[in-house]
Amino acid sequence: MGESVSTSEKRKILSRQTKRNLVAYSFIAPNFIGFCVFTLIPMAFAFALGFMKWDGSNPVQFEGLGNFTRIFQDTFFKAALRNTIIYCLGTVPLTMIASLALAILLNQKIIGRGIFRTLAFFPYIASLVAITSVWKMLFHPTKGPINNILFNVFGVEQKNLPQWFSGGLVLLSMILFSVWKYMGYYMVIYLAGLQGISAELYEAAALDGADAWGKFRYVTWPQLRATTFFVVVMLTINCFKIYDVAVMLAGGGSGELTPSSTVLVYYIYQKAFVDWDLGYSSAVSMVLFVLVLIVTVVQFTIEAKQDR
Amino acid sequence: MKSKRNKEIATKIIVYLILIIMAVLMIIPFLWMISASIKSDREVFKMNPFVFIPEKPKWTNYRDIWTKIPLAVFVRNTVVLTIVVTFLQLLTSSFAAYSFAKLKFKYKKTLFMAYIATIAMPWQVYMVPQFIMLRKMGLNDKLMAMVCLQAFSAFGVFMMKQFYEGIPDELCEAARIDGMSEYGIYFKIMLPLSKPALSTLTIFTFVNTWNDYLGPLIYLRSESKKTIQLGLKMFISQYSSDYGLIMAGSVLSLIPLMVVFLIFQKYFVEGVAATGIKG
């Protein structure tokens, strides 16, 4: 008797749990189905394609590691890899420092704070096509106001005026542009982090006689560690996938890049959608993936060590 | 005491000085854009003296750009695409996030891990197989392809989940005891509370979709399907020295972004703080 009651009760609980599962899945399903079909499946496919040879219409051939041995003899690839890494090394620290400094300034009680914050965020929302064409005008080698000032005010000779978007300076221009465009975004993230620091910590530091630098060194910086970690990871990932900044600042009429300005994603695009060498292109994207993975793992390890 | 006060004033002045320089650097390209958009090609680069508004402003730039390229078509495509993507993104990701944050169910951890793992994966890594797949599905050169691509991001789910976790569970429990269904709790309690998070996600999604270049470049080949970004780029490569017209088109392409940003910015910093995007 007692036993049968407990089984029926069990069944009831079980079905209630099933019902709860179903409700939960019904919430997730609309997003998850889309996410699964359009993100997870292509992702898995990308790994496989790196070991294949395929032009998109003829049958797929197994290539093994062939694509990867080809990659490391490819000078254009090496240029793209080198430029992408240099771009990251320049952009990540500069953007981080600029956005942190700006956030600290704009977290104080200041007249016109809202306006300053909005202005700092403006470049982030501006579309690249529009704003890069302004930059190309401002930094135009012969007619632009920047070189005009260098010529008229600083007396730089005509033949020495910098060519901002070709040759050796192009990476620098890309870095400066990116810092300008994206610092507002990371500033907002830092602002959110700063607002989470309790005022008591600053009061305690003031009682201990800390000056502005001391407060930053012993309160702000350690308290912002999680934020900084997030900012650096996001910045690095975003820097590795640079494409449109390069094409729009340094690309010629139809957007083609030279070895001095090429980046990894540009090469992936060219190999896939211009040359239809899909396997090779996927092999290049695997390199991009591994780079991002290494950086993320390294940063996670550092973060975990500091936590202890 | 006096010297301390002087020092404070000096710091204040330096702070304002830095901020003003920053503001000027941020705003100059925009002012240049507006100024150049009403100039003739001969006036754009005239430096001595530089005039912000020329004597005879060339307002015709704003009229001519609509006929030089099919701008109206580009605008319509971009508006439709951005609105559909933003709407789907907000709805599906807040829906899924509610489940991850407030419900207990089987495989919850595994499913959420699938989302987290892809956040760090740049889209560029799998854009090629994704294209092949969507082409197989007959979506090449269709706006629908862009919707599929952008409407279901892991980022949105992650962000909304972080926000919902900040809302006390007791609120949901109380409603459940009152006999409200989970759908009721989501629509009547959670959604009204998520204004800051939804505003933040709206800004991000709207800006990203409106400004996306590489996605449309891969998928949208025919002119009647192109977005503003592609159209502007096309115009620039054809008429690279028609600066006035290029700038007029650029100004027009920025207006909707500015409007959306100014509407939702009220909740913006609060939203970023509450959603814990900060990590």
Image (tube, coloured by chain):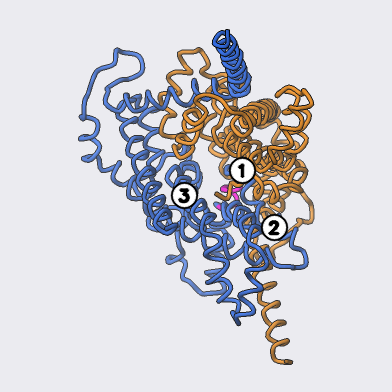
**Front residue (pair B237, B227):** B227
Label 1, label 3: how far apart the Cα atoms are: 23 Å
Does residue A68 appear to the left or right of A122 in the view shown? left
The residue at the point 77 percent across, 23 percent down is B179
Residue pointed to by mark 2: A117
Q: Does residue B50 show up magenta in the picture?
A: no
Read off the magenta span.
Answer: A131-135
Image quarter in which the C terminus of chain A is found: bottom left
The residue at the point 66 percent across, 36 percent down is B206
Give whichever of discs 3 and 2 has the lower sequence position.
2
Residue A239 coordinates in the image, percent (x, y): 45, 48
Residue A165 coordinates in the image, percent (x, y): 46, 53
Give the residue type that dot 3 points to.
Answer: Val
Among the 4 quarters of the image, the one containing residue A33: top right
Label 2, label 1: how far apart the Cα atoms are: 19 Å
Residue pointed to by mark 1: A127
Residue reaching furthest to the front = A1
Q: For numbered disc 2, what is the local secondary structure?
A: helix
- For the colour orange, the matching chain is B
Residue A184 coordinates in the image, percent (x, y): 61, 54
Give whichever of discs 2 and 1 has the lower sequence position.
2
Give the residue type that dot 2 points to.
Answer: Arg
Dot 3: few (<14), some (14–19), or many (≥20) neighbours within 10 Å?
many
Q: Is residue B78 above or below residue A146?
A: above
Q: Which label sits in the foreground, 3 or 2?
A: 3
Q: For numbered disc 1, what is the local secondary structure?
A: loop
Dot 2: few (<14), some (14–19), or many (≥20) neighbours within 10 Å?
many
